[in-house]
Image (cartoon, helix red, strand yellow):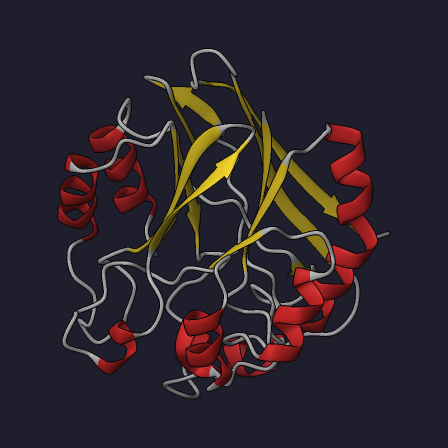
Amino acid sequence: MKILFIGDIFGECGKYAIHSELSNIKKNYNIDYVIANAENTTLGRGLNWADYNELNTSGIDFFTMGNHTWHKKDIFEILSKQKNIIRPANILKELEIGKFGVGSKTILLNNKSVRITNLLGSTVHFKDQQTNPFLYLEELLEKDNSDIHIVDFHSETTSEKNAFLLNFAGRVTAIFGTHTHVQTNDTKIYNNTAYITDVGMTGPKNGIIGAKPESIINMFMGNSERFRLEEQVGKYQFSAVVLEIDDLSNKPINLTNILIYQK
């Protein structure tokens, strides 16, 4: 079995990259199923109905999200009505945003039960509205009996992501880091768990993690305390990984990174 996981789709450029590259990638790698992080799809923050429908008909089978999940009001209805999307699971239950959708789902793929889980790292600035992702997954694993378990760990720091791997290695099939938008060169299979610190971003290749540079550089120069996130235009990059799983043992046997720059 081969599963393609696409890193954070960012804005119009990210959608164009999907239209331009996905079909060929699926064919060339003989992909069985496509998962994509879509939290930055609509204007760099969130996901609306139009973009969900566009991606849904472009060859993506399942969607994960992140800290920008709730930036577009459509998401509440999308999470409530659609079965192929999850948001971060470890949101405080008493919050209104925690009442829509779920953070972990099991699908049937090639006669295998495949669980997909979305978790928000403690290092992501989210006004302490998330619970501890380590403890959440520990509790989930106590009752999980899926054949294959893929985790999108949406975290800010490399240290938290690496700690997550070492704690859960051998207990989940794959841990794919997202959120920082820069693909790392550390694909590995460690103790029967496939891992990459960050899958990277599918979106503008010449911005600052997808955004126009001006206001972000201005902030780093000390001229403002915050930056204004505006999506960059121009050529794209396509970031993803291909996970190959042995059909007999359900264990990962290969993890290949994909990083395509539009010429």
- Residue 195 appears left or right of 7: left
Which one is in front, 18 or 248? 248
The vertical placement of 31 against 202, above or below, is above
Q: Position of residue 163 (x, y in %)?
A: 23, 37
Count of numbered labels shown in the rendering:
0
Q: Residue at x 27, y 31 (%)?
A: 145
Q: Position of residue 14 (x, y in %)?
A: 68, 63
Residue 38 falls in which quadrant of the image? Answer: bottom right
The vertical placement of 196 against 124, above or below, is above
Q: Residue at x 41, y 88 (%)?
A: 224
Residue 206 visible in the shown view: no
Q: Residue at x 64, y 56 (%)?
A: 202
Residue 113 visible in the shown view: yes
Q: Residue at x 23, y 59 (%)?
A: 90
The vertical placement of 73 against 176, above or below, is below
Q: Position of residue 49 (x, y in %)?
A: 60, 78
What is the residue that sits farthest to the top in this orientation? 248
Q: Assign the N terminus to one quadrant of the image.
A: top right
Residue 236 falls in which quadrant of the image? Answer: bottom right
Which one is in front, 60 or 80? 80
What is the residue that sits farthest to the right in this orientation? 263
- Residue 185 appears left or right of 33: left
Q: Position of residue 123 (x, y in %)?
A: 25, 59
